[in-house]
Every structure is written in C-alpha cells, then in structure tokens.
Image (cartoon, helix red, strand yellow):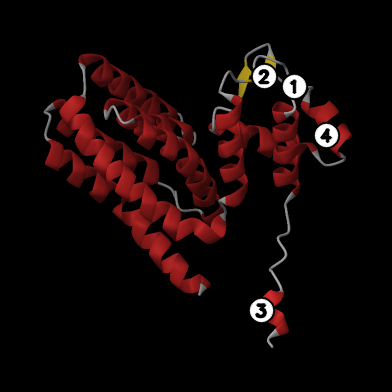
Amino acid sequence: MDVLANFKTIEVESPVDKIIKQIRNSIASGQLKPGDKLPSERKLSDSFGVGRTYVRDAIKKLEFYGILKTLPQSGTIVSGTDISAMEGLIANVIKLNEDDFFHLVETRVILETYACGQAALHRTSRDIADLEESLEAYKHTIDARLSGVREDFNFHLRIAEASRNMVIKSLMQILIPDILEIYKKLNVCGEGRFYKSFENHKEILECIVKQDSKGAEEAMRSHLKDVLDFSSSYKGEEK
C-alpha cells in the first residue's frame, strides 16, 4: 500500500489571501453589508496584525473584482454585488495564482478573441463612444509616463460589454486582474509595451467600428500573441 497516495499537498496561504477570506466571512455573515464602509488601512493593519502593504494589496485585488469600491473622500465600501456571487468570486480570487499563468493567458485569448468578433457584430454607437473614451484615457495615462494597466483592462472590458455576452465579461473580471498582477511581477510590460498596445487597440477599435468581425478577432489574437508566447515559454521554464 502506497501511504504517500493518501497525503495531500499542504497549501500555504499568503497574508493577502487570509485577509480576503476574513473580509469574505464578514460579508457572508452579514457583519459587512453592501454600502458599509471598511475601517481605515491603519486600523485593519492593526487588527489583522500585518503590515499595511498586505491590507492594501488585498483591498486592491477585491476592488478589481468589484467586491469593494474606494470612493474619493469616503474610503472603501462594500459594493452592491449579490452576496452569493461575491462568494464565488472571492473563492476564485484566492485560487488563481502564478502557477496558473499559461492557462490564465490561454483562456484569456480564447475569450477575448470571441468577444472581439461579437463586439464587431453587436456594437452600438454608445459602445463605440465608450471604447473611444477608454482608448483616450489609456493614451493620456501613458503619455504622462504612468502605468496604463488599469486603462488597458478597462478597454478590454468595454469590448466584452459590447459583445453583449455578460458571461464573458464576468469571466474576464475573474481572469484579467490576476494576469495583470503576474505581468507586473514578471515585468512582461516593459518599456514601450504600452505604446505598442495602444496601436493594437486602435486597430481593434477600427475593426469593431467597421463591423469587421473576422478582422476584429484577428487583431485581438495578434494583440495577445506576444504575451501568450511569453507565458508558454514561462510554463516551460517552470517545468
């Protein structure tokens, strides 16, 4: 009998994951309700017994998923998202990590390629205006020599909205923030990368405006090719 077959790998949780779980439990138990304000980072840090950086990272991750929302002058509040939906989202926030990098990117390419083609078919004048606004915000940010990660994410999310497939949008909200976090750790977005992405975004938008579904799919696939290739080689190195 193989005794080792009965043993399971021990999962070591990071302080960020533990903070996320405690916030989840507070939401699930009703101690925190939609609209409730969280204590300050300093108070949370003291309560959790960890540095403020961990608290800040946990809040940022939950903000990406729409579970928390930080309002100017008001602090961080619990969003109005359905609690049962939050439970599923938070579970995924914790589970996805750097080990899943290749599969995260691979799934992103499949979802976004399809969404882009559908956006070209179903986009409205409002969608085009929203995409143009997102693209302009992206350009403004990178011209100021700032990271355009959030603006990049918003542009892609607008495409998902234009596709009229809200399941894809929800899946992207789960996948992309983790991918972007790993991008930063591995320095995928090097100098000049944001400007190249901006040009790719312009090409994608042109196809969507012209309702060129196949062209939009190809433009998105080409846009994501570099990072897919990188994630593939990274996967190989890990093995």
Residue 38: mark: 1
Labels 2 and 3 touching (C-beta < 8 A): no
The disc, 2 or 4, on the residue closer to the chain's N-terminal end is 4
Name the residue rendered at 67%, 19% in the picture.
77
SS at mark 4 in the image:
helix
Q: Quick check: 57 left or right of 227?
A: right
* Kind of residue indicated by mark 1: Leu
Please identify, in this view, whether the residue under mark 2 or under mark 4 is nearer the observer. 2
* Kind of residue indicated by mark 4: Ser
Residue with the mark numbered 4: 45
Q: Residue furthest bottom?
A: 1
The picture places residue 108, in percent across and down from the top left corner, at: 37, 47
The picture places residue 23, in percent across and down from the top left corner, at: 73, 32
The disc, 2 or 3, on the residue closer to the chain's N-terminal end is 3
Circle 3 crowding by C-alpha within 10 Å: few under 14, some 14–19, many from 20: few
SS at mark 3 in the image:
helix
Please identify, in this view, whether the residue under mark 4 or under mark 1 is nearer the observer. 1
Circle 4 crowding by C-alpha within 10 Å: few under 14, some 14–19, many from 20: some
Q: Is residue 133 visible?
A: yes
Quadrant of the drawing holding the N terminus: bottom right
Residue with the mark numbered 3: 5
* Kind of residue indicated by mark 2: Ile
Q: Quick check: 25 left or right of 113?
A: right
Tell me the distance, in whole angstroms, between the alpha carbons under discs 4 and 1: 12 Å
* Kind of residue indicated by mark 3: Ala
Q: Quick check: 180 left or right of 31?
A: left
Tell me the distance, in whole angstroms, between the alpha carbons under discs 2 and 4: 17 Å
Circle 2 crowding by C-alpha within 10 Å: few under 14, some 14–19, many from 20: many
Tell me the distance, in whole angstroms, between the alpha carbons under discs 3 and 1: 44 Å
214 lies above or below 126: below
